[in-house]
């Protein structure tokens, strides 16, 4: 007897018009490229997500469904345009899903552009909603960046959490203190579904020896205040004063944040020391990680840190602030008291002076193998589907 496939809609509207991927989207794509044969999946995503999925290795056969995020703009130059895109994609996705039938909907983030259509779908069709979460925003009083923007984001996340608490069948949180905090928050709000702890991971590579540039560091991440935007140039100014060290910055942010970084680099006299690459495809990221000696990530807010485990696998020294999420990496990363730029710069200089690249045992790296993580997660989804 042939068993019917589990029909599942994956929702990832956070891209908006840009193909730049966050850690949550990298996680989703690594699950989708390992989709078991007993699942029938469609990815509902925006214009930027369509581009990213088509360019991502292993997703060529994935069924994609376009969700509009803009009827007026071709780019998102300011935060307001991105917020407007979230609203457009949330309601467009809800409309599209209302005419289709699934056993499950899986939201890859707690952005309301993902959670709102999932809430309506679960309410109308009684399908099971699996809600993946990553980290809880800090209080607007503590979060770097524009205070008004931070208040809006904080309230939006609280709204999404209320939707998840009311309607989701299962909650997925990361095996970190940040994940535990989200779980506690949603249980306090009355969440009655199943809770599962999950992991982020890395695409295991066979090569373990790389030709390193001992004066090169790489930053990979979104360029916004919560990811350390305001710390990059001040820290690197101190590092650069100690030697001819180079930093490559990979990632994008809003037009205003990108302009801030360019001006801050000029202000600190770092035109020859810092290179802004912007968005880079997967193959280019691997090239920079294999060449860099040090991974530089002065982020103020993280749910886990996929780029960190990738950097460790490529033999990079890693220097970060001592965020709770980074405890999973133990002794393999150098954690600096939050948010001491002076100490951070000293740690970077000290790491550069070490003669050998980082050598993390594969026994540690393999704990975060995407193959194992995906197998475990899809097994969990099967159990949710057929309790």
Image: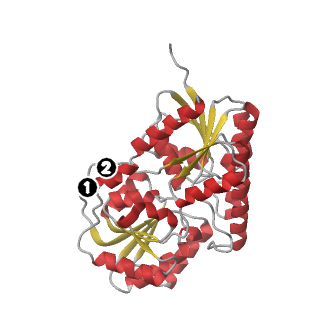
In this view, the residue farthest toward the bottom is 241
Residue at 45%, 84% (x, y): give it: 342
Residue at 63%, 71% (x, y): give it: 143
Residue bearing the label numbered 1 = 208
In the figure, is residue 263 to the left or right of 326? right
Q: Nearer the viewer, residue 18 or 108?
A: 108
Question: Quadrant location of the C terminus?
Answer: top right
Q: Position of residue 57 (x, y in %)?
A: 42, 43
In the figure, is residue 301 to the left or right of 72? left
Q: Where is residue 127 in the image (x, y as percent from the top left)?
A: 68, 32
Residue 69, can we see it?
Answer: no
Quarter of the image where one finds residue 294: bottom left
In the figure, is residue 369 to the left or right of 152? left
Residue at 48%, 33% (x, y): give it: 61
In the figure, is residue 255 to the left or right of 321? right
Residue at 46%, 39% (x, y): give it: 376
Residue bearing the label numbered 2 = 205
Q: How many labels does the image show?
A: 2
- Determine the secondary structure under disc 2: loop
Figure coloring: secondary structure
Q: Position of residue 173 (x, y in %)?
A: 56, 51
Q: Which of 276 and 213 is in front in this view?
A: 213
Residue 192, can we see it?
Answer: yes
Q: Is there a contact, CB below 8 Å, between mark 2 and mark 1?
A: yes
Q: How crowded is mark 2: few (under 14 residues within 10 Å), some or many (20 or more)?
A: few
Q: Residues within 10 Å of mark 1 (few under 14, many from 20)?
A: few
In this view, the residue farthest toward the top is 1
Res 362 label = none
Marks 2 and 1 sit apart, C-alpha to C-alpha, by 8 Å
- Determine the secondary structure under disc 1: loop
């Amino acid at each position: 007897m042939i068993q019917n496939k589990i029909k599942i809609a994956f929702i990832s509207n956070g891209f908006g018009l840009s193909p730049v991927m966050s850690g949550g989207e990298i996680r989703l794509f690594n699950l989708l490229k390992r989709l078991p044969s007993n699942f029938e999946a469609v990815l509902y995503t925006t214009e930027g997500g369509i581009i990213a999925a088509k360019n991502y290795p292993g997703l060529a056969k994935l069924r994609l469904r376009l969700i509009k995020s803009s009827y007026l703009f071709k780019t998102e130059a300011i935060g307001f345009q991105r917020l407007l895109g979230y609203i457009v994609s949330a309601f467009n996705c809800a409309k599209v899903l209302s005419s289709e039938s699934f056993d499950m909907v899986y939201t890859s983030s707690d952005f309301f552009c993902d959670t709102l259509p999932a809430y309506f779908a679960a309410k109308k069709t009684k399908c099971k909603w699996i809600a993946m979460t990553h980290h809880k925003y800090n209080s607007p009083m503590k979060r770097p960046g524009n205070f008004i923007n931070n208040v809006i984001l904080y309230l939006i996340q609280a709204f999404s959490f209320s939707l998840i608490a009311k309607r989701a069948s299962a909650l997925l949180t990361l095996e970190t203190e940040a994940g535990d905090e989200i779980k506690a928050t949603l249980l306090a709000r009355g969440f009655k579904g199943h809770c599962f702890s999950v992991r982020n991971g890395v695409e295991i590579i066979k090569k373990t020896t790389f030709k390193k540039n001992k004066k090169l560091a790489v930053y990979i991440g979104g360029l916004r205040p919560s990811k350390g935007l305001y710390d990059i140039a001040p820290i690197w100014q101190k590092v650069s004063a100690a030697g001819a060290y180079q930093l490559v910055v990979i990632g994008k942010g809003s037009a205003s944040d990108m302009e801030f970084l360019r001006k801050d680099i000029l202000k600190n006299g770092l035109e020859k020391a810092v290179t802004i690459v912007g968005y880079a495809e997967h193959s280019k990221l691997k090239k920079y990680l294999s060449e860099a000696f040090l991974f530089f990530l002065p982020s103020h807010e993280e749910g886990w840190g996929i780029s960190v485990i990738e950097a460790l696998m490529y033999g990079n020294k890693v220097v970060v602030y001592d965020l709770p999420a980074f405890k999973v990496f133990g002794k393999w990363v150098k954690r600096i008291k939050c948010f001491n730029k002076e100490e951070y710069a000293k740690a970077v200089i000290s790491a550069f002076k070490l003669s050998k690249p980082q050598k993390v045992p594969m026994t540690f790296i393999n704990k975060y193998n995407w193959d194992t993580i995906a197998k475990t997660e899809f097994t969990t989804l099967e159990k949710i589907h057929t309790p």
